[in-house]
Image: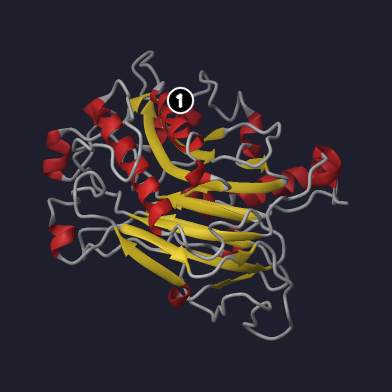
């Protein structure tokens, strides 16, 4: 029995993971549209019309995904955790001139909603997901929402908040139903100047100076397992690795590494030195970057960590299947004035062809797969530290 089990009195209820990655570009401003409920999704009601449409679109995508992949291996297995990740900046407000010029502006706080929108959005998505049996045993990372604190003294204090939610469970536990986690580092491509980050203002509760526990806020204990969550540049800065170092120094070597590491990003790849999961554990990243240079389709990655060599063995693209979303504004965003679609860019969801063991015993053979797992020849993904 490890320390986590002694502390929380609960074993991991899942042995496998079915990865689902939402492929949608999020780097440039996009019009909100006026998304209406589809695929059996409920109507989402929010005070901010821009946020409501984007939230409705995400919920539509979730219901469409659950129905489209209803027969995927592991989807109906209670021992399989269904993991869905949307990319960073999915919820970012965009004025008409920002969409026209493909650039966020200071006068809109760089595409930010009021800070209170974070909780309103989380409640709306959680309400839709929790009410439906389609999302039993799901874990959803709903991308991030950009928001701004009330202006006080002329300083702009910005937040970039990841949302992680749970679907229905066969049995309840004492864990929170959803988590709001702040991005720790602003990148130079995010738009705002770095000193606009709320973490750098000592007068806010989001400041590292006043909230030192924030260094551990990306470790979430759910379902008898520990999940590590990071947003883009935080991954390259090894936020999760550093959090585990602090825990180990404070509590002792009995502290177990996370069972699963998830990254939502816009301009980031998995960095092996930043992976903190158990030996043989999984790391998954969903990215939203699609730059004007050639407007490529955003990437995702799922890999298995080898602690002995500090390397990640990525699952090959052939291990996943893709379904494109219906080409309407209820499901897809209008990205870069339609040029992304004209160039053949798709929007949809990738899903594993098989459920993956949450932890596999490493072998001494190079690139060997655990019995019964998807073969995973090495796929080279060079770190791109920009997001």
Secondary structure state at the residue bearing disc 1: helix
Query: On the picture, is 68 further left or further right than 74?
Result: left
Q: Can residue 183 be seen in the rendering of this structure?
A: no
Q: Quadrant of residue 46?
A: top left
Query: How many marks overall?
Result: 1
- Vertical side of 76 occupied by 46: above or below: above
Q: Which residue is drawn at 22% across and 27% down?
A: 107
Q: Residue at x 45, y 63 (%)?
A: 351
Closest to the observer, 254 or 70: 70
Query: On the picture, is 141 further left or further right than 111?
Result: right
Q: Residue at x 65, y 52 (%)?
A: 241
Q: Quadrant of residue 361?
A: bottom right
Closest to the observer, 325 or 42: 42
Q: Residue furthest bottom?
A: 365
Q: Which colour scheme is used?
A: secondary structure
- Percent coordinates x, y for residue 138 in the rendering: 54, 47
Q: Mark 1 points at which residue?
A: 119
Closest to the observer, 21 or 77: 77
Q: Quadrant of residue 176?
A: top right
- Vertical side of 316 occupied by 266: above or below: above
- Percent coordinates x, y for residue 208 in the rendering: 58, 30
Query: On the picture, is 12 further left or further right than 337?
Result: right
Q: Residues within 10 Å of mark 1 (few under 14, many from 20)?
A: few
Q: Can residue 378 be seen in the rendering of this structure?
A: yes
- Percent coordinates x, y for residue 341 in the rendering: 17, 60
Q: Which residue is drawn at 69% across and 59% down?
A: 15
């Amino acid at each position: 029995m490890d320390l986590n089990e002694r502390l929380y009195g609960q074993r991991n209820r899942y042995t496998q993971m079915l990865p689902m990655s939402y492929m949608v570009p999020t780097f440039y401003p996009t019009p909100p549209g006026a998304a209406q409920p589809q695929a059996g999704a409920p109507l989402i009601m929010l005070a901010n019309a821009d946020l409501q449409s984007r939230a409705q679109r995400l919920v539509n995508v979730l219901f469409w995904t659950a129905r489209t992949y209803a027969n995927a291996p592991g989807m109906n297995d209670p021992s399989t955790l269904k993991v869905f990740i949307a990319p960073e900046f999915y919820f970012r407000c965009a004025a008409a001139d920002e969409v026209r010029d493909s650039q966020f502006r200071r006068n809109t706080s760089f595409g930010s909603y009021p800070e209170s929108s974070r909780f309103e959005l989380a409640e709306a998505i959680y309400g839709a997901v929790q009410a439906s049996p389609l999302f039993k045993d799901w874990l959803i990372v709903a991308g991030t929402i950009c928001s701004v604190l009330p202006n006080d003294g002329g300083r702009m204090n910005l937040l970039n908040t990841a949302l992680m939610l749970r679907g229905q469970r066969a049995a309840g536990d004492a864990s929170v139903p959803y988590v709001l986690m702040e991005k720790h580092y602003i990148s130079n491509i995010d738009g705002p100047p770095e000193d606009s980050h709320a973490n750098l203002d000592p007068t806010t509760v989001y400041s590292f100076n006043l909230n030192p526990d924030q260094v551990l806020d990306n470790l979430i204990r759910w379902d008898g397992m520990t999940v590590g969550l990071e947003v883009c540049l935080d991954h390259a800065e090894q936020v999760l690795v550093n959090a585990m170092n602090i825990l180990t120094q404070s509590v002792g070597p009995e502290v177990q590494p996370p069972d699963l590491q998830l990254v939502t990003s816009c301009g980031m790849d998995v960095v092996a030195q930043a992976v903190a999961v158990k030996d043989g554990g999984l790391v998954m990243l969903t990215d939203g970057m699609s730059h004007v240079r050639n407007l490529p389709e955003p990437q995702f990655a799922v890999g298995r960590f080898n602690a002995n060599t500090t390397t990640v063995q990525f699952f090959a693209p052939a291990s996943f299947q893709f379904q494109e979303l219906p080409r309407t504004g209820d499901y897809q965003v209008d990205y870069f004035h339609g040029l992304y679609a004209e160039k053949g860019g798709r929007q949809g969801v990738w899903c594993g062809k098989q459920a993956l063991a949450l932890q596999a015993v490493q072998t001494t053979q190079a690139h060997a797969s655990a019995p019964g797992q998807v073969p995973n020849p090495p796929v080279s993904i060079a770190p791109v530290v920009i997001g």
